[in-house]
Amino acid sequence: MLALLPSGCASGHRRQAEAALAQTSGRLTVAVLSRPVTVLRDPWGIPHIYAETQDDLFFAQGFVAAQDRLFQMEIWRRTAEGRLAEILGPAAVERDRVARLLRYRGDMDAEYASYAPDARQILESFVRGVNAYIESVSDRLPVEFEMAGFRPEPWTPEVCLSRVSALGVTGYAPLEVFRGILIRELGAEAAADLVPPDPAVPLDLEILPGIDLKELDPKILAGFRAAGERVSFAAQSSARSGSNNWVVDGTLSATGRPLLANDPHRALAVPSLRYMVHLVGPGWNVIVQNRPDCSINIRSGSTGASGPTSVRGPGVASRHCTSHAPDTSCGALSAEPYNRISHSPPISRTNTIA
């Protein structure tokens, strides 16, 4: 769908949008930082963040991500919380229902304990940065908020732990429904032959008491599929996303170092799904390509690399990591050119956040 606006209206929105652009050069004052943080933006707009403490580093990452992608982040946040219908109307109710069904309601201490020891501290710093930026621009929000008629709300660390984002990269639930229909129509043995399990293990397809396969229909997945789709204000492409990656052990490589190739086939969109940032601080020197509403996803750096891929089996994602001594160059295929850029990035603009 293409909306044509009168020229005066379009130019007015352009001026309004330009007036609300984030300040990406000069000095910004933020009271909660313990040390000044320098943000260098290269000619491609990629921020290179240099901080003296880990808390300040991830605070600045959240702040800078919000500078660049606040409206996108707020849409994703509402997607995760099942609150899109508040701004998009009844058409979003079903996907909101599924998002709320998938919301984690367990023990958050146990949840954080399943991550890296400093994950909670990193997320808390990240969302403090997001919230600091929201507060700093409360009177001149990005123009999209004005046009859509709502305001961003304060973030919590739990926003970054959404289960809903995984729906776009797993296809196992539809496969289970299809397998159930095959059992109903052809029997369990034929279903196991036609759709073998992955990984290949003996499969007991006994139908449990109380389960009526007559009610099984692909239509029951409508809400599930909707919850995993990106929010679009125009017609969406029907193309499906996918992924692949591979890793080679260092004993099989010419250099003796592991090799990692990561190729997540995700939908092309504006703004992009990915957000690139270079983080430099105590224990950190990494190039990150992540969703702007989370801290670390795909990375390459001076001590290792990691990358996720979507899978169509019973899991949701598979992550391969390589690591080695800090004084060697990274063995990931994509890491070395990034590191050459990151050590001395060509500078277009400089922010000091203090």
Image: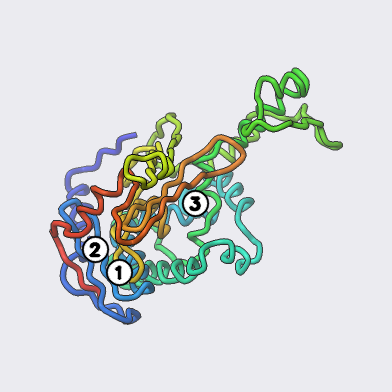
Question: Which numbered dot is residue 79?
Answer: 3
Seen in the image, is 28 located left or right of residue 314? left
* Residue 260 vs residue 142, the one in the foreground: 260
**Res 175 quadrant in image:** top right
* Marking on residue 236: none
* Sequence-first tag of 3 and 2: 2
Location of residue 154 by image quarter:
bottom left
Which amino acid does the dot numbered 2 rest on? Ala
Depicted 77 relative to depicted 307: above or below: below
Sequence-first disc among 3 and 1:
3
Disc 2 marks which residue? 22
Rendered view: 2 above or below 159 = above
- Of pointers 1 and 2, the one earlier in the residue sequence: 2
| Disc 1 and disc 2 in contact, CB within 8 angstroms | yes
Q: Which residue is more in the foreground, 117 or 297?
A: 117
Q: Residue at x 64, y 61 (%)?
A: 105
Say the numbered circle drawn on residue 137.
1
Mark 1 → mark 2, Cα distance in angstroms: 8 Å
Q: Does the CB distance between marks 3 and 2 fall below 8 Å?
A: no
In three-dimensional space, the C-alpha distance between marks 3 and 2, rounded to whole angstroms, equals: 24 Å
Identified by mark 3, the residue type is Thr
Amino acid type, label 1: Val
- Crowding at mark 1 (Cα within 10 Å: few <14, some 14-19, many 20+): some
Where residue 18 appears, x then y in whole percent?
19, 57
